Amino acid sequence: MAIEVRPATVFADVATMVGPKRPDANVCWCLSYRIPSALNRELAGTARGALVEQLVAETPPPGVLAYDGPEVVGWAAVHPRADTSFARNRRIPHVDELEAWSVWCIRVRPGHRGRGISHELLDGAVDFARANGAPAIEGYPVDNRGEKVDLTMAYVGTRRLFERAGFRKAADTTSVLAGFPRVLMRLEL
């Protein structure tokens, strides 16, 4: 069956991908880069999920989901950079004044990995940004030079994943994740 990528407008499906098994647990919910740091530290337990439920109801929603038939199998967070902490991040530079979008988290459910779903998600994030008027889209993956990346830290993607989607390196950053430097990859839309 073909993978279909759609805007993340179904909260239960987003929760499947980024929510905790226990609703009161303090997990990321993919909010770490989406909201200001102070608010991210302040939110706890069910308040995190409640905020994501609000974001899913907004236009545009906070990302895209990949489906294999009716089953949600992947997530990519994508939104205007101005609405993320990357707007103020000192380690990840601004390339120019374009109102670029950012894609910062790509997750595939266990049992579905190794099937190219991350590529489908990144392509879907590009299409989503384009459909919402983005002039460019950026990602901040690790430049792992072919070395294995711990799955816990692989959510940012790899330089090679972005290159295969047509992105080009636009800048170095001073950000490091899992021992690998992150690079700013960009695709003009």
Image (cartoon, rainbow, N blue to C red):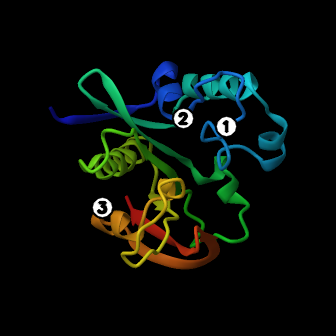
- Residue 112, given in percent of the width and then of the height, sits at 30, 40
Q: CA distance from mark 1 to mark 3?
A: 29 Å
Looking at numbered disc 2 in the image, what kind of residue is underneath it? Val
Is mark 1 in CB contact (under 8 Å) with mark 3?
no
Residue linked to disc 1: 27
Looking at the image, residue 71 lies above or below residue 168: above
> Could you tell whether 57 is left or right of 163 in the image?
right
Residues packed near mark 2 inside 10 Å, few (<14), some (14 to 19) or many (20 plus): some
Marked residue nearer the N-terminal end (3 or 2): 2
Q: Callout 1: 10 Å neighbours few (<14), some, many (20+)?
A: some
Task: Check disc 2 and report the residue beneath it.
Answer: 18
> Of discs 3 and 2, which sits in the foreground?
2
What SS does tag 2 mark?
A: helix
Q: Mark 3 Cα within 10 Å, few/some/many (few <14, many 20+)?
A: some
Q: Give the camera-side residue of 27 and 103.
A: 27
Image position, residue 79 (x, y; %): 54, 45
Quarter holding residue 66: top left
Question: Circle 3 is placed at which residue position?
Answer: 165
Disc 1 marks which amino acid? Val
Whether pointer 2 and pointer 1 mark residues with C-beta atoms closer than 8 Å, the reply is yes
Closest to the observer, 10 or 24: 24
